[in-house]
Image (cartoon, rainbow, N blue to C red):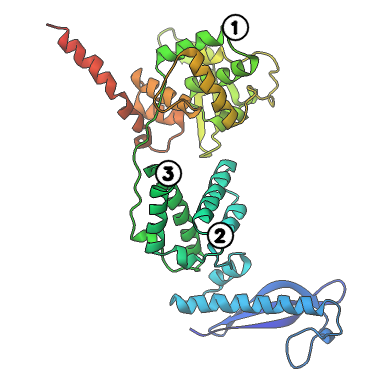
Amino acid sequence: MNATIKLILRKDFKRKDGSNSIFLRLTINRKSRYFPIGISTHKGDLQKDKFLFKNSIKDSAINNMKLNQNMVKAQQILNDFIRFEKTPTFTEFNLKFKSDYNSKDFYDFALNYINKNKNLSKEAIRTYKSQVTKLKKYHSGKISLNEVNNLDFIKDYENYMIERLNNKTNTIYKSLAFIRTILNEAIAHSIVQDSVFSKIKLKKVAGNREFLRFTEINTLESLLNSNKLSPTRKEVLRYFLFSCYTGLRFTDIKNLTYGDIFEYPFYNPETKESTNREMISLDMHKTKRQVNIPLIPQAKALIKPDNQYHYCKIFKVLSNQKTNQNLKEIMKLAEIRKKGGISFHCARHSFATNAIAANMSLPYVSQLLGHSETKTTGIYVKILKDVLFDETDKLANMQ
């Protein structure tokens, strides 16, 4: 398939100052499409023998450089079609020509992806940038996408994380999965043809999901109502316990307002009466999925009745790091010790695990957590294997 490019001055695109817009014309099999490059001029400002600005025209050097950059970029796109043995199309050319993904340096490309991707949360952006920093410590200076997209490079980086950084399996998984994400983005823009990860299966192991039992949560409730905590730690414990009773993630707790709580007419089939029950209804920050969570009395008791304007936030939430620091001290006071330590996300684990322990149906637990599939919720069932000891003890006690 024949494809050519050329710069033209379109007389039918005249601006208010009388100048005409310059376009890049792409012709594929005698059909043409025009792509604006953001420069306009008068016909007399251009040289007669070639498409360049006359030296006497203001900013001619800058504009000539822009013209050259657009032609080089367009030619590189056409070359990539040939290199990857792909048929050029106007749609794909337009996607590549309009984008900024023309850098073949891995770090530049990765940072461009991070900064331009509007779907990434602040936490994801922070995590991805830390992965770039981590990789730069292993390989400083520029490195091309093709150099990273190499089995030897990936294996050497994996060995570095094992031997030098003492990284665990899941930490290594996250670092390599980040590289895989960037390479997949490069494939989508035809900068690389395929990914080395089509030949590699990344390893991931089930994490140790710490949770608090009902008795431990009751201990924390008693601590909250005592005079042993500072006002700051009381507030941290208050929103931590609220998460234990609702399963909300940290960011959703942080953003929760009084306007997210609604009254729902609950019909009791036994009494045949309707009563207004309170329910949280919101779109989860991480997944954008809507969840509806009925408030049990323990959760309602943690909501202060003052400042109940719809836009007011219910809790004064510290940063995730400071929250976890305070939780560490709170657990010491409560004499609650866990091998893996307690972080804020432990509250969500506690909600899920205790809900299953209370014989709540798995599909309902999944819906309350905002999981798209029940198999995601099923990971909490594995945690409850210790309950089997309680059950088999009943058999032993029958003698």
Asked if residue 145 lies left or right of residue 11, the reply is left
Q: CA distance from mark 1 to mark 3?
A: 40 Å
- The percent position of residue 311, horizontal first and vertical second, equals 69, 27
Residue under circle 2? Answer: 107
Q: Secondary structure at mark 2?
A: helix
Residue under circle 1? Answer: 227
Q: Residue at x 63, y 67 (%)?
A: 98
> Which three-letter amino acid code belongs to the residue tagged 1?
Asn
Q: Secondary structure at mark 3?
A: helix
Q: Residue at x 41, y 44 (%)?
A: 167
Q: Is residue 201 above or below residue 398?
A: below
- For disc 1, the neighbor class at 10 Å (few under 14, some 14 to 19, many from 20) is few
User: Along the polypeptide, which appears first: circle 3 or circle 2?
Assistant: 2
The quadrant of the picture occupied by the C terminus is top left
> Which three-letter amino acid code belongs to the residue tagged 3?
Thr
Q: Residue at x 72, y 75 (%)?
A: 66
User: Along the polypeptide, which appears first: circle 1 or circle 3?
Assistant: 3
Q: Is residue 80 above or below residue 321?
A: below
Q: Name the foreground residue: 279 vs 113.
A: 113
Q: Quadrant of residue 126?
A: top right
Q: Name the foreground residue: 94 vs 173.
A: 173
User: Along the polypeptide, which appears first: circle 2 or circle 1?
Assistant: 2
